[in-house]
Image (spheres, coloured by chain):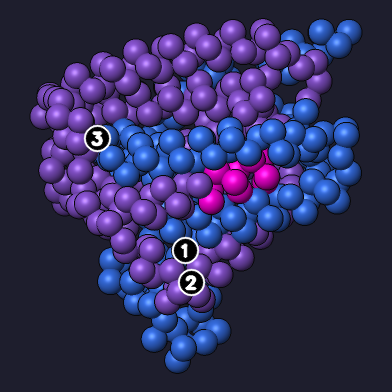
Chain colours: A purple, B blue
Amino acid sequence: MGPLVVNEIISENTNLFLAFIIGIGFGWVLEGSGFSSSRKLAGVFYGYDTVVLKVFFTAAITGMLGLLFMSLFGWIDLEWVYVNPTYLTSAILGGIIMGAGFIMGGFCPGTSFTAASIGKIDGMVFIGGLFLGVLIFGLGYDIWEGIYMANYLGEPKVSEALGMKDGLFGLILILVALAMFFVAEWAEKKFPREEY
Amino acid sequence: MNNHSNQERSKRYLNPYLGGVLLGLVLLAANFVSGRGLGASGALKSVIVTGMETVAPAASENSGFVLEYKDSHSGNPMKSWLVFQMLGVLVGGFLSGAFSGRLKLKVEHSPKISSRRRLIFALAGGILFGFGSQLGRGCTSGSALSGMAVLSLGGFITMMAIFGTAFALAYFVRKNWI
């Protein structure tokens, strides 16, 4: 059955229309969870508001479990679902640069768009920065192409890398997330902030 | 009074665990429809590639960045899944804000810092995040969240690098936030 577009159940144009609809859901949930506020997002790094951690890991687990179960029921063929390739060097280096951008700017790209959509000027400026950053990467591509392409490992799953079944890894991830949620709830009581 | 307004506000936001489940379902829908997860920085790349081709068509033909993009994407860069999805994000964010009474033109910042300082940091953070998202082949949505759902090793590594670095640097920019 799924993915619908790969199995030609829907046309390419329908796929783009559904992208728009799915985007509305994406933006709605991000904004509705408070991700349009940089001060709420940054809270996770100081413990006063851990909404990022809770939403992010609940979503990752829901998505992961959903895909595993849908595959089990034969509703989706995971062969056709894109698994992000792993380029070890750029995955780490890119992540480090993004982390620095996150704590300085208070947004990630998706959340900055929801912030801008409700009138946050800091979100709009962050988006301006994003375009500049992508442009700098594009114009200087030859300089960092070597780093960008280094240490290509294919499309390994984390479960394969750790030598365990997908389901077992999923269970461990859920337990880790529950432990983090427990710490997060504790942190919010320990480092409360009245007004932000 | 203060307590009351805090309660009022927290009521207006979704419960974070419910929000997470809903976000996970949106991610699942994306995979079910298109075979790929969500993303934000991919749409930025489409815009920049289009811009480069429009402003400097000759130079773009030799740009490794544009060639690499063309290698993995066919057709008009603006007619891509993530561009349409990000347009939806703007609409969805606006609707959610409108229904909850959060539409307001303002610079949000800690009372301890000026708007100017907030905007300078927002710009610098945006530049870093934009650059990093290209190097890391996706941002928090496309690489970390969507990658984790399909158990991509790279997705987990990028997620840990993003959050680990932000935690490690939090102390140095604490004045901006607490």
> Disc 1 marks which residue?
B45
Residue, x 41% and y 48% (percent of image)? Answer: A92
Chain under disc 2: A
Chain letter of mark 3 equals A
Q: Is residue B116 above or below residue B134?
A: above
Residue at image position (24%, 45%) is: A83
Q: CA distance from mark 3 to mark 1?
A: 27 Å
Q: Which mark is residue A138?
A: 2
Labels 2 & 1 near each other (Cβ < 8 A): yes
Which tag is nearer the camera, tag 3 or tag 2?
3
Return the x and y of residue A43 as percentages of the image width and height: 66, 27
Q: Secondary structure at mark 3?
A: helix
Tell me which residue sits at (71%, 38%) in the image: B172
Magenta stretch: residue A168 in it? no
Tag 2: amino acid: Gly
Q: Which residues are magenta?
A: A97-106
Residue A44 placement, left or right of A167? right
Gap in angstroms between the C-alphas marked 3 and 2: 30 Å
Q: Mark number for residue B25?
A: none
Viewer-nearest residue: A26 or A142: A142
User: Circles 3 and 2: CB distance less than 8 Å?
Assistant: no
Identify residue type, mark 3: Val
Labels 3 and 1 within one chain:
no
Distance of mark 2 from mark 1, alpha carbons? 9 Å
Residue A104 part of the magenta segment: yes
* Structural crowding at the residue carrying mark 2, measured as other residues with C-alpha within 10 Å and reported as few (<14), some (14–19) or many (≥20): many
| Label 2 in the same subunit as label 1 | no
To which residue does mark 3 refer? A158
Q: Which mark's residue is nearer the viewer, 2 or 1?
A: 2
Residue type indicated by callout 1: Lys
Answer with left or right where residue A7 lies relative to residue A136: left
